[in-house]
Amino acid sequence: MNEKNYLNTPNLTPRDYDGPASYSGINFTQFQSITQNIFSTNDKPRTSSLDSNSGTNNTSKRLVCNFLKQHSSYDVLPVSYRVIVLDTSLLVKKALAALMQNGVVSAPLWDSTNQKFAGMLTVSDFINLIQYYKHSSYSAAMEEIEQFQIQQLRDVESRVGAPPPQLLSIHPLKSLYEACKLLVEARAHRLPLVDVDSETGQEMIVSVLTQYRILKFIAMNCIDIKTLKKPLSEIKIGVYENIATARMSTPVIEIVNLLVERRISSVPIIDEDDKVLNVYDSVDVMTLIRTGSYREMDLPVVKALLRRSEDFPGVHTCTLSDTLHSIFDLIKKAQVHRLIVVDSENRLQGIVSLSDIMRYLVT
């Protein structure tokens, strides 16, 4: 097997997030046990001067794109890392245990029969299982799931009407710009890096790029993000209408149905005044599945949140006056997957996802 020359570019900082930073935030005392810390970009200094020249922001985007074109996908990876790869013949329950034990929510798949990369196991696969078994008896569902293999999940997708997952991957030495374009076009959150051995022709799974990992790499190493000074109110990225929301009393199964119907990854939890209390993430579904709580999908989300992992990174908010520069500053320090846009009273206004940020930069 030929050894590939995957050398990280000198003086770059492709470091994984080492743990939550210490932020001050809004503390809802009436929901202390079930509302996580809500971190706001307002807790950090922001650049107050706004760029009135529309061409300047386009120039800034071009500079960021040039940065992405100058670096390979492999540059983003930490100096030391591990990859969890699951065989498609593995039982789903064992795959779930492996994910939870290693603190990850997805993993690349390997088809040992055909000796090739076979896609990704993600939260969507487990949500499809819930959809598939929600009208079955609990005992029958549990008996069948005990023997369910990963490769059978493709049958589940067709039965629940879910679109088949795309078999996405990219070579580690392809540019970050190409990786970002592929993620945006496919509306994907992660992208496996797959190489091919030059002697045997066999595929090799190198690692997996995530949107967060790429954007943090930009935040840590691209000085041109300092010029992204226009506020969200002007660059108009994110969703601000017809936002799916829930209350603390909403049953989990209703939120799961929203995730599936809207093809979204999270639902803000608000009170009667539209103030943001929390966010139910698709990853939270895995906690219920891990504990065997298929039959408890009717419990209110307020109780489901009590079972959330202690390492949940919290809910991060911003306002329409925040800039991409200030958002990248937050991404440097915290594990951000989306930002909930709120007004001065913490009322919900919109959602800015990492997909929205990446799409804005490369399109």
Image (cartoon, grey):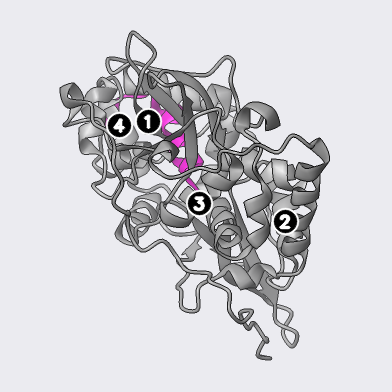
Residue marked by disc 2: 64
Residue 29 placed where, x, y %? Answer: 17, 26
Q: Earlier in the sequence, mark 1 or mark 2?
A: 2
Calculate the distance from the C-alpha at mark 4 to the C-alpha at mark 2: 45 Å
Q: Earlier in the sequence, mark 4 or mark 2?
A: 2
Secondary structure beneath dot 2 equals helix
- Nearer the viewer's eye, disc 4 or disc 2? 2
Name the amino acid, label 2: Val
Residue marked by disc 4: 294
Secondary structure beneath dot 4 equals helix
Number of marks in picture: 4
Calculate the distance from the C-alpha at mark 3 to the C-alpha at mark 2: 15 Å
Contact check, label 3 and label 1, Cβ < 8 Å: no
- Nearer the viewer's eye, disc 4 or disc 1? 1
- Nearer the viewer's eye, disc 1 or disc 2? 2
Residue 334 placed where, x, y %? Answer: 41, 52
Residue 24 placed where, x, y %? Answer: 28, 42
Residue marked by disc 1: 280
Name the amino acid, label 1: Tyr
Name the amino acid, label 4: Tyr
Magenta residue span? 122-140
